[in-house]
Every structure is written in structure tokens, then in C-alpha cells.
Amino acid sequence: MARYANKKRWPDEVFQVGDLVLVSARNITLPWNITHKFNHQYYGPYKVSKHINLVTYELELPDVAQFHNAFHVSLLKRFKPDTKYG
């Protein structure tokens, strides 16, 4: 029962200013002629520039990004650099 109850709880992921995070592509709209099944699930890494409130973070996005730079914590994932291939 705890497994089902925990699905509705907010993630307790806490990011600090300067951390690198990935942004979920779930709410990012792309042009209609792009096949969505071949797109990435996450974009980034981007640096956290500001902690706005309990569940919102502001990111440093490139200038060509045409969407808002504040994201809910559930749309963010900590960036873990892959040292296996680098």
C-alpha cells in the first residue's frame, strides 16, 4: 500500500544553485512535422540559477530557447556525467 501512496507524493529532490540538471521533454512542444518517438526524453544539462520556492527552480537556458526558464521539480532530473565513455 505504501508504494501506491508514495506515487502521489512530491519528489524530495533538492537542487542547489550551480547544480547541473536535465529538463524533461514532456511539456516542451516541438514543430508538428517532427516525429515525437525519436526525440530525447530529457534535454540539457542546464545550470540551476535560482531556487524560486519549494518546488520551482530557474535554469540558465540558451538564448535560442523559446520557453520559460522556470520549471517544477518533477520535470527536473540530476545530471550524472558518464565517465565510462569520456
Image (spheres, grey):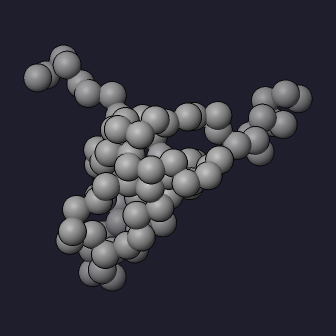
- The spot of residue 65 in percent (x, y) is 27, 69
In the picture, the quarter occupied by the N terminus is top right
Location of residue 3 (image quadrant): top right
Q: Quick one: 76 or 55, which is closer to the camera?
A: 55
In this orientation, does residue 2 appear? yes
At 57% from the left and 34% from the top, the residue drawn is 13
Determine whether 12 is above or below 26 in the image.
Answer: above
Q: Is residue 75 left or right of residue 32?
A: right
- The spot of residue 33 in percent (x, y) is 27, 81
Location of residue 62 (image quadrant): bottom left
- The spot of residue 38 in percent (x, y) is 29, 58
At 47% from the left and 61% from the top, the residue drawn is 70
Q: Is residue 22 left or right of residue 44?
A: right
Q: Quick one: 80 or 36, which is closer to the camera?
A: 80
Determine whether 47 is above or below 36 in the image.
Answer: above
The residue positioned farthest toward the right in the image shown: 1
The residue positioned farthest toward the bottom in the image shown: 32
In this orientation, does residue 24 appear? no
At 24% from the left and 24% from the top, the residue drawn is 82
The residue positioned farthest toward the top in the image shown: 84
Q: Is residue 72 left or right of residue 11?
A: left
Determine whether 73 is above or below 6 in the image.
Answer: below
In the picture, the quarter occupied by the C terminus is top left
